[in-house]
Amino acid sequence: MIIEGMTVRFGTFTAVDDVTLEVPPGSIVGLVGESGSGKSTVAKAVCGLVPYTGRVEGLDPRRIQMVFQDPYASLNPRMTVGASVAEGLSVPKARRAAEIERLLSLVSLPTGLAGRYPRELSGGQRQRVAIARALGAEPSLLVADEITSALDVSVQGAVLNLIRSLRAELNLSMLFISHNLAVVRYVSDVVAVMRKGRLVEVGPAEEVVGSPKHDYTRELLEAVPRLGG
Amino acid sequence: MRHLLRTPSGVIGLALVAVTLVIAAVGPAIWGQEAETVNAAAALQGSSAEHPLGTDHLGRDILARVLAGGQFTVALAFLATAIGAGLGTLLGVLPAVLPRRAGRLVTGAVNALVAFPALLLAMFTAVISGLGAKGAVLGIGIAFAPSIARLTQTLSASVASADYVAAARLLRVPRWRIATRHVLPNIGEPIILNLTAALGSSLVAMSGMSFLGLGVQPPSYDWGRLLFDGFSRIYVDPMVAIGPAIAIVAAGIGFNLLGEALARSVARAPVGGKQAVGKGAAMPSSGEEPVEGAVLSVKDLTVTFPDGVTPVRGLSLTIMPGEIVGLVGESGSGKSMTANAVGGLVAYPGVVTAGHMSLCGEELSTLSEAKRRKLLGTSMAMVFQDPMASLNPALKVGGQLAEVSLVHQGAKRPAAWARAIDRLRQVHIPDPEKRARQHPHEFSGGMRQRAVIAMGLMGTPRLLIADEPTTALDVTVQRQILKLLREVSAEAGAGALFISHDIAVVSELCDRVVVMYAGRVVEELPVADLVDGASHPYTKALLASLPDMETDRDKPLASIPGHQPSPADVGEGCAFASRCALATDRCVERPPLTRYDAAHAVACWHAETRKAEVAIG
Ligand SMILES: Nc1ncnc2c1ncn2[C@@H]1O[C@H](COP(=O)(O)OP(=O)(O)OP(=O)(O)O)[C@@H](O)[C@H]1O
Ligand code: SF4
Ligand SMILES: [Mg+2]
């Protein structure tokens, strides 16, 4: 998939300014940047959730799924976990329950949660439900907007591993947005750094992290929290 | 309900509505006969002891007629409101379901109709559809529909922009299904609240129609008709008109007040609809004495929900002044529940018990509700992950901060405003005078979180509880907020409880780390010892699974197999046993939290710790 010259304007404010970025099939492109830099807007535009100028080419728009940043807003509070996960399923009714169970275990959730409501779940549990829901639609591009910021490290590892293995098995490409550079570095093949609506640096993950060319990338790298302070 | 009764307008509204409904329910049965009793000899009398509101031209008692006519009046109002609600909701949801252009047409039509005077519209419809109760009810229903449609549209527009609707659209869920499953259920509550107030208005409007002769026709009667009959005699016998007028006004105001109070009580309910649990808190008994000088000392804190759901199990925690304690643990381990229990925010039907729970040396469970509220309001500040949960989107930021001083410290308005600006400056919000006059949506995420922290600083907090305050923020902003929290706790000498699932963030900010698993503390140690002193298998696994800038990208990340037991089925033994590589037969018994030295405690039978050797040798 390729994004070419994407620009998104809200009134007079330009949230995304002429962004060109390629996500080769089966690869993961990480997008980092400060809050308000336009990362989430790129994600929404790619999914067709906000109007943009420019082009997104090279894949069936119906096979794009998104996992959202805020696990409190991404699940309908009046629907059970099972019903939410079932929304994207196209399996016959008889196999639906089994499929919901499979998806819940895929994201390390107890299958017993299917009958519960989001308010009974903790933030991290909700986010995993949202991931299960997206995976249920068998996407070819998964847009993940800060999906690990609400996950525990102990599960984050499993989810990142899972996402990498899904990519390998299903040829799943992914636009992976995160403020956590360590996570982006680990999971992505290519890292793109965004600031004020523009891409300031794009390159292979190790290169961008190992020898950053832009001052802003260096600043981001320094802000990464490290164990032991 | 308690919220409702806290304001005078809520009490008055509820009382008026209750009286109206009782009269409507029993009126015809009790006074129906008397209301119809013709007595030509007593025709057209004024107010007297026998007929407090006088009699009409057939000598019927007007008071009896008012009381008996309540049922018809209220029923007509209900009917008109129901028509308005049905029609309005339909019109309101249509734009969300129809194709874009048709949707815009409906929106435009609704907007035009809203601008049209409702009573004119009602009269117009009534005249067209024929005089009488039926026409009037229809007219008023139609007249109300546009404003309800607009309300529905506004509400559904906000629901339609929610992430879960976006997700459903991406999943190609059909439009009508999005409307019925996602939009309608989530806007039902505010609409129903609004309808309560609408009932009042439609009762008054319906009476107005009858009064104008466009509504109920004799021999039927409602309050409006009674007013019409009495009006011609108002200069001679004022009571014959004033009686029905009072009934109409009282019922109308009652429904309006109640609707407003209901809406306010829903808006005011603390974060996430949580409620303080007062009675559930146990008396201090078995617990040891609170730790001397601690800002927070909690012993054996337990939070339970029905069906054996117990998210927090006998947790003890001490925070000293100036100390920042990090609470880490995976999602669902009970971190937020612990914070909420301390802050008195556990949702009904949750029950909080504790050996002791003392804030700044005051035992919370023995304080009266009012005193507890005051102590929590002035000595404790809470910051949540989502700053919008603590900010009202409709009010200016400065005003919301000042409100804290007005309510808790009884400050005067200018002083409160000045303090608000001062606190915004303290949290490094540039140009605080200007920012104070802005609404939360004009702030960036990081700035909103600063504003919430500033709000916490309006009092003189001794304890700061921050539940994942930086999770939604990116690293650079996160760093600034962490610095701010440290600054604030140092300046105010306040203790802080910092909740996070990110152990790296905790290790940067905190002095001490408390690790939670399945509702219990499994390890407690100084941050400095975290990297090579951690000895609980869970803590160690947590540290190992953290990717950093040097992690090998070709190997899978370390992760802990299995998952944490849900708070309803934490067994007898060590809760971590099913995921633990070191588990043995002994682990079917739960290991107690054992203290190796003043700062390090571990709950594990096989914690191979240097500290243990020190303790033994
Ligand atoms: N009202 C409720 N009824 C029943 N169970 C509840 C309720 N609220 C929370 N729980 C359960 O209590 C447990 C602890 O929740 P809590 O929010 O304290 O977790 P947490 O450690 O803060 O997690 P996270 O890191 O995801 O925020 C969860 O398993 C949750 O499902
Ligand atoms: S007590 Fe046993 S099961 Fe529990 S953490 Fe220690 S070794 Fe593992
Ligand atoms: Mg939490």
Image: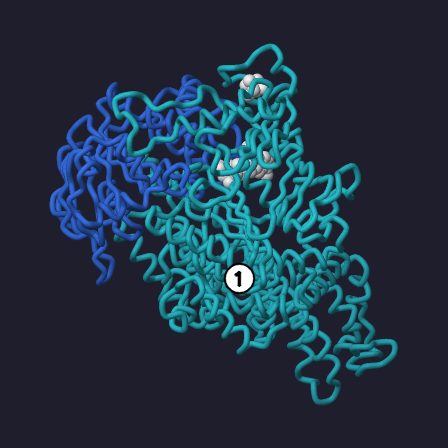
Specify the colour of chain B.
cyan
Q: Indicate the chain coloured blue by its letter.
A: A
Chain letter behind tag 1: B
Looking at this rendering, what residue extends furthest in the bottom direction? B235
Residue B435 drawn at (x, y percent): 39, 68
Check disc 1: other Cα within 10 Å, few if <14, some if 14-19, many if 20+.
Answer: many
On the image, which quarter does residue B589 sit in? top right
Residue B555 drawn at (x, y percent): 29, 21
B530 or B456: nearer the eye? B530
Query: As drawn, is A179 to the left or to the right of B513?
Result: left
On the image, which quarter does residue B522 sit in? top right
Is ligand 3 closer than 8 angstroms to the Cβ of mark 1?
no
Kind of residue sitting beneath label 1: Leu
Whether residue B152 is visible:
yes
Quadrant location, ligand no. 1: top right
The structure residue drawn at horizontal position 68% and vertical position 62%, both measured from the top left corner, is: B6
B417 or B464: nearer the eye? B464
The structure residue drawn at horizontal position 87% and vertical position 76%, both measured from the top left corner, is: B50
Count the numbered circles shown. 1
The image quadrant where one finds the C terminus of chain B is top right
Residue B36 drawn above or below residue B529: below
Residue B426 drawn above or below residue A165: below
Residue A112 drawn above or below residue B54: above
Residue B326 drawn above or below residue B244: above
Looking at this rendering, what residue extends furthest in the top direction? B585
Residue B246 drawn at (x, y percent): 70, 75
Residue labelled with disc 1:
B457
Residue B179 drawn at (x, y percent): 40, 43
Whether residue B275 is visible:
no
